[in-house]
Structures are given as C-alpha cells and as structure tokens.
Amino acid sequence: MELDRMDENDWKYHGEGNKSLVVSHVQHCRVLRLLKYPAEDSENPPQTAEQAFRQIQNIVDFTSNVISCLLGEKFVHSGEVVRLPLEFVRQLSIKIQHQRPAWRCDKVMDIYSGCALCLPNLTSPTLHQPTPTPPLCIEIKPKCGFLPSPKHVSKDIKTRVCRYCMHQHYKVANGKWKRRSLYCPLDLFSGNKQRMHFAIRHLIEEPQNNLKVFKGGQCIYSSKEGSDESPDTNSLLHHLRPYFLRGNNRVNGHVTTKAVLNDFIQVLGNALLSAAGGDGGQVTDRTGEGRSFCEASLFNRERIRHGSQGLPTNNILSRILQTQMLDSLDIEGLYPLYCRVEQHLQDFPKDRTGLQIDGPYDQNFLEKVQKCLMEDDDSVEYAAAKVHQYRIAMTAKDCSIMVTLVPSSEEEDDDEEPQAFSSSVSVLDLDPKPLDSVPRQLRLDQKIVSCYLRTGGTLP
Ligand code: ATP
Ligand code: ZN
Ligand code: MG
Ligand code: MG
C-alpha cells in the first residue's frame, strides 16, 4: 500500500461499530479503521490531528503490550497507525456514506486527522490453495461471562442474573431492540458443549450486535437496530447449505435445514473450544463458586448430562474470561477507588503522567497491573492499579472474536465424511477505555439493575 498514492476506488465500506468505521481494500487483505465523531461535532473535530494520531498509537500500544500478553499474541493483531492524504479520506467518506446503516449515522467518519489504524482483514484470510467454497468468518461479541462476587454488590440480583441478560431487558424497555435475545454469555463461556450450542443458536436467532457472519469477506448476516424484522435466518441457511451437504445429514436423500444449522453450530463451537495459544494462564473453573449459571438463561440445567467440562487451559474463551475477571471488585467496589484517583489528580495534576492514566501503555503499565497488591494499603498507586485492571477488563468485555472456517479441499469422493474445516481465531476491537468511562459505567449499572428489578424480568 503506497500511502501517498491512495485511491478511494480501491476501498469499500466494510462495517462499523460505535467508535470506528472500517473500509476494506478490494484486492489486498487489509482494512483501515477510522475514528468516528458525534455528528454535531462534524464541523469542529473534538481533537487535533496530533491527538487523533496519539489516540490510535495508544490503541496499537495497548493491544501489543498489554492485551496481547493477556490474551495470547497468537490471537491479537495490533496493526499500525497510518497517515492518509486528506483528499483521499474526504472522497472515501463521500463514497461510502450511502452504504452506512441509518442507525449508525448519529456519528460521522473523521475526515480531519488523516489518521487511521491499518489492520489485516480478518474476514478475508489468505488461502494457500483454492477451496471448494469461500471461507466463512463468524464474528462474536461475547460480552461478560461471569457473575460478580457477592462481596462487592449492593443488589443481590447481580449475583444471580448476569449483566448481559439484565441489559437485554433495559434495551427492550428503551426501544433499542424489539426483542430480547436469549443468548447468555455464561452459557457460551461454560465450556459445556450443550450450553455452548444453546448460546450460539440464540445468537443466530437474535444476533443484535453480538453476531455477524461473513462469506468470502462479505457480511451476509447481521441485525438492524430498532428494526421490526428479524434477520433473515433462511437466507443465512441458504448460504450455509453448500458447506454442510456431506456426512450423515440426509433424511430420504435430502439435507434438512435443521441438520445444516446443527452442523454449523457444532463446527463453530468446536473451533472456539480448540483455539488455544501460548502458555501460562490458569484453568477457569467457576463451578465451585456457584457463579457459572445465570438465572435468566433458559438453558435447562438438568439437560447437562455429563457435568460441566469447563474451558480448556489457554483456550481463547478462557483467556478472555480471565481478563474480564480483572474486574474483581465490580463497578460498585471499584468506584470509591476511582474517586481516590480523581481526588489525587485534582490535588496533584502532574501525577497523571506517573500514574500512566492515559498511557503510555508499555511494559511498565502491564507490570503495574500484574503486580497490584491483594490488599488496599490506602495508596493512590493501589487505587490506580485497580482502575487500570478494571479498564482492561472492560476492553475484554467489549471485544469481538473472529472465527475463520476454511473448508478443506475435497478429499476423495467420500461423501459419508462430514465436511472438514480448518479453523483459526482472532480477537478484535481492543481499544483502551478512558478513565471517565468509570463513572458512566456506574450510572449505567444502576439504571440497568433498577429497570430489571422494576420489570422483574417479566418481559417476553
Ligand atoms: P464497538 O461499537 O463494538 O466498540 P468499534 O466501533 O470499536 O465497535 P470495531 O468493532 O473494531 O469498531 O469495528 C467495527 C466492525 O468492523 C467490526 O464489528 C468488524 O465487523 C469490522 N472489523 C473491524 N476490524 C476488522 C478487521 N481487522 N478485519 C475485518 N473486519 C474488521
Ligand atoms: Zn445471563
Ligand atoms: Mg466492535
Ligand atoms: Mg470498540
């Protein structure tokens, strides 16, 4: 990619989240991830080009020095900051505008800084040989997979119903989504095949912003916010059918839709369970603590026939869960420590740098987080380290997992064998969360819990 000779026609709209917009190269397996601003700020960018560059460099540093050590470098791509010609960025923004979903247009793409994050395109894996059907990539935003410890929460419901399930009621009550999803992260993170199957099936039924499916680099399945229609599961199955025609799927010579869906879920679940990397890390077993089941999940516990297997060591789900669990105090237990840091910064603004509140996210930052004391010694260093841990946990609660399934080329004509796939897994969306997200999280937590207690979890 020659940065001084960029042509908007080489790039196309790929997708976006709340904070960034992504375009992909039409030939090379690259994407550019650009910042977004609230539309009201479109005339006045909220930060200078240098600040935007710093923000993206912070993402790269945080990903490569902190997150990659916690999740395993095999799964993490930190990318690089690039400076793009402003004229290219402006033309690009005009070109892609009509492809953006209306509900995302409360924000505009940053056309002022010329800075972007350049990453490998995780939905278009480089193939070493041609495959019978294009690779499938499944993006899952799993959200938080554990219940907080009763020690730190003021409302008992938080130790019984998980945050995702409570949040669903809040989102439906506020019209963000029309229907509640029956996906529960605790089922996905259980490591139990039946519970994972159940979780993935409900992600497919109500994907919201937790599931997207790509075929040959193109998004073929996702939800539209606030929309009345359910996403078209039949169209997804139509896309999936050619991948699952082999094996024992035939009933009277015909492969049922149910069999296609079951096979797909099984392949995806196995890919998640088999994705292991690096060493270190502990076994994640929360069964003894009684914190591994959410009362709102409709999965029937009696259906677990072989007990809970738990997640294998070093597995990607287990790595993400361990990192999420750096939030050991819950937002309620953390908030007083956040206030201690804030108070200290008001009294000693210069300490902001030494405490590494806004980075740099280097080796030293990681050490502060990993060597944090077990007991509070009333110091600001302790408080800052807990706040850092909490912010890292928030990144792990917000990240996405991209599972790539590459069909193996047909071996002999053995139609009896199910289609084999080689799978790989990456994690994306790994931005550091700012300090002021802490008080926002506390307010949101209070709103979600009181809404759940009011509606008593009685919504359909
Ligand atoms: P969120 O609102 O979830 O925080 P975000 O604004 O931080 O999202 P991302 O999740 O990083 O943005 O990117 C938006 C979307 O772009 C992703 O959901 C994914 O579909 C796509 N995307 C991001 N990075 C890549 C990549 N490296 N390869 C392919 N697709 C990508
Ligand atoms: Zn739940
Ligand atoms: Mg995202
Ligand atoms: Mg994000």
Image: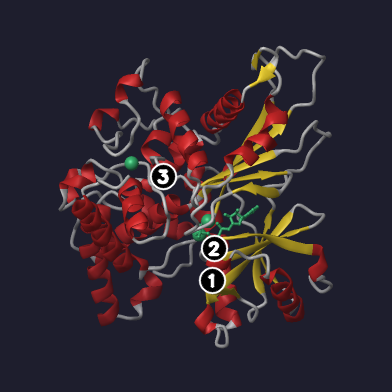
Q: Quadrant of the C terminus?
A: top left
Q: Secondary structure at mark 2?
A: helix
In this figure, what is the number of numbered marks? 3
Proximity of marks 1 and 3: CB atoms separated by less than 8 Å: no
**Figure quadrant, ligand 2:** top left
Q: What's the residue type where badge 2 is placed?
A: Ile
Quote the CA–CA distance across marks 1 and 3.
34 Å
Residue 440 rendering spot, x and y as whole percentages: 32, 67
Q: Quadrant of the N terminus?
A: bottom right
Residue 250 picture location, percent across and down:
66, 15
Of helix, strand and loop, which one carries label 3? loop
Q: Which residue is mark 1?
A: 55
Q: Nearer the viewer, residue 195 or 67?
A: 195
Identify the residue at horizontal 79%, vertical 26% (top origin): 409
- Mark 2 CB lies closer than 8 A to ligand 1: no
Q: Which mark is residue 181?
A: 3
Q: Is residue 358 above or below residue 172?
A: below
Gap in Å between the C-alphas at discs 2 and 3?
31 Å
**Above or below, 268 relative to 442:** above
Left or right side of 381 for 248: right
Mark 1 vs 3, N-terminal side: 1
Q: Are marks 2 and 1 in contact (CB under 8 Å)?
A: yes
What amino acid is found at the position of numbered circle 3 in the picture? Ser
Task: Please give the residue where the numbered disc 2 appears in the rendered image.
Answer: 59
